[in-house]
Amino acid sequence: MQQIISLLMENKPGALMRVTGLLSQRGYNIESLTVARTLDPTLSRMTITVEVEPSSRAQVIKQMNKLINVLQAADVTEGASVNREMVLLRARTAQSSRTAILKEAEIFQARVVDSSTEGFALEVTGDPEKLDEFIDVMRSYGEIDVTRSGIVSMSLENKKLRLSPPVPAGPALDEDLELQEAE
Amino acid sequence: MSSNLLSGAKILLECLSRENVDCIFGYPGGVTLPLYDAMYDSPIRHVLVRHEQNAAFAAQGYARATGRVGVCCATSGPGATNLVTGLVDALMDSIPIVALTGQVSSKLMGSDAFQEADTFGITRSATKHNFLVKNIHDLPSIVHEAFYIAASGRPGPVLVDITKDVFQGQAHYAPVSEIHLPGYKVHADGHAGQIRRAAQMIWEAERPWVYAGGGVIAAEASDELRKLVELIDAPAVCTLMGLGGLPAEHPNFISMPGMHGSYAANMGMTHTDLIIALGVRFDDRVTGRLAAFAPHAKVIHVDIDPAEISKNRAADLPIVGNLARVLPRLSAEIAELKPAMQARNAAARQEWWKQIREWKAEHPLVAERSATEIKPQHLMAEIDRLSGGRAIVTSDVGQHQMWAAQLVRFSEPRLWINSGGLGSMGFGLPSAIGAQFARPDKLVFSICGDGGFQMSIPELATIANHGLPIKIVVMNNGYLGMVRQWQELFYNNRLSQVELSTFPDPEKLAGAYGFKGRTVENPAELAKALEDAVAEPGPFLLNVKVTAFENVFPMVPAGGAINEMVLRPPQPVEA
């Protein structure tokens, strides 16, 4: 089963590499990965879908939380979260099928983003299983091309974000550590 | 000097001074020319090693001997890639070092420029964290962040890759007053409720067992460990990384556990009903086959790194925190419960100690001797005698390392310096250089095998250069002994590529560098030869020819349970 991991991280060069490296160095294959900055432009939110054996999942999350650039990593596979994906689909179709395709698109709440004599480009969002079905249906009408965004996830739980406060620069005196840890 | 125009190279040196860096182990090159030019006027001492890998190992020797951050420096490309083994080694053993590397100018990056390598990418998984500095204005805070990350929490190596144009650029330098790493969590205190529950569990145990590791050394918590052990009067083992955490002479100290641990250590670990694990990671060399490890035990696991908790062995009671902070509070809780709880399992605990003493008597670790040849164990016993528990002993990797860990005693932390997790051959000599620079007052033995020594021979020049009075003791059996041991035991004695038939004449070799060396092979002369080496004011290379085919025992075969030790060759003995 896929594990869905949501990360809040610093928007810095190399931060992505640290997260993906942690997975690749254990031989895990990333199924999908989305990342973009948050309301705070210094931070990014990332959603990763990855096949990890259940016994290693907690360890992977702990290792991600240890990364200096990661503010929070959470397993959102289970628990309250919304998971959505977007598909862009190009259907090349005979004139005779055009109406039928538009009907199907309507059922799946897909939008037409391009229309030409060769066919349509459609945009649809939803949970990944629904999108699988949409793709299957469209495939039955002829040749299609598909681009999937990968899952974007948002936790519905109120997890407290614990951030470390600034510390004085210079040699790590014990007093400095006290300050850091007093919070 | 609140704000003045300085080059990036000078700004870097200013930041290093603020971090109290007094010594850098390094090797210059093309892109670090501006840095080395600035160093020309700097009070910070630079030690020129003969290979960058040894700069990283020397920085580790410095850090391991003092607990302070060790610093190494290399140029771009090959200089940086040569550091990698030393970085991974520091990562595995949680040793705080900062590596400074030069990078080609930012405009040239990605163009396959001369001596360009993707140091930032290559060292991502070799470090606790790494930085790439392309903008001079980022340099001061990054340098301080690097030192903070290296030294705090679970210590480790941090690399700062700096482009040549940053070294050459000019900027107004104002000392950075604070750094902010919002995502870097240092867990220090440990949960008060968990600590209280741990105290309760400890009194409820009939056969408690302390399993202490490198975390005790890193946290400078050895006094606290001793107090705890005495308070509950529990037997204690120290891992390869934790030796010296409890004085070897302490009556509660058993030995090192694991693959080459003593019979008593491994039997105790197998039969205890409560493991008090302090700064350890349940490494495979300690646990043997995990499924059979400590089958009767509950586990209290105290570690500063939450990712170590329940990684290999599930913890019944985890405490995430710094041992220096957790142990005093744990001891206080234990002391509070003592009047009420002490009598509860007193009889069972007496029985437990009796059993342990029997195991110790049954198969003690003894330094065998022979009248005709020098046994490796004899050599270690002699080094132990001369050290008296007080010398710094660095070791390389292999059989000699295990014999030294079994037989050389350490009365305090930071005396035993070896490559534990990564097992890097070639570590022994350069780490002794770092240790001797850090502790000029200390007698330093560098015990090497004839294999590992030959990986580090270039550093004899560094030792000679600085007249470092390191006593290099080569345990020479003419083989890559540990690999040969496994070929003997598990590969039908087909000895493949393990014979080291050539070894340089030590007298000539040391003489070529301008110091003394000799060979000793008569067991009657060993003690005197070592004494002479120690008496020599400068460096000394003592080549000790030992029994060629001696193997390290006890031994837990790979994949075996630790109570299924092979105590003596050839046939396994029932545990």
Image: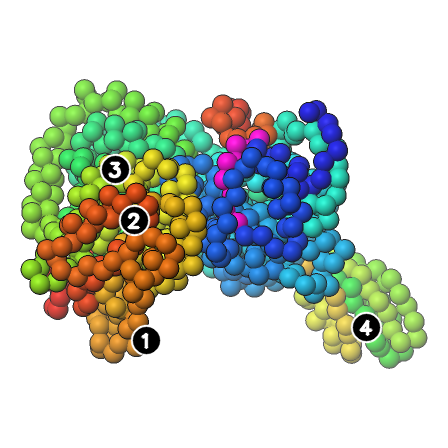
**What percent of the width, then of the height, locates residue A24?**
55, 61
Protein chain holding label 2? B
Instruction: Please name the amino acid that badge 1 sits on.
Output: Gln
> How far apart are labels 3 and 2 at the CA level?
14 Å
Which residue carries the number 1 mark?
A: B497
Q: Residue B471 carries which label?
A: 2
- Residues under numbered marks 3 and 2 in contact, where contact means CB atoms less than 8 Å apart: no
Q: Is mark 2 on a helix, strand or loop?
A: strand
Horizontal side of residue A4 vs B234, given as left or right: right
- Magenta segment includes B22: yes
Q: How far apart are marks 1 and 2 (CA)?
A: 29 Å
Q: How crowded is mark 2: few (under 14 residues within 10 Å), some or many (20 or more)?
A: many
For the residues marked 1 and 4, what is the alpha-carbon distance in whole angstroms?
A: 63 Å
Image location (x, y in percent) of residue A128? 66, 60
Which amino acid, mark 2?
Lys
Look at discs 4 and 3 and give the one toward the viewer: 3
Q: Could you tell me which secondary element the residue under label 4 belongs to?
A: strand
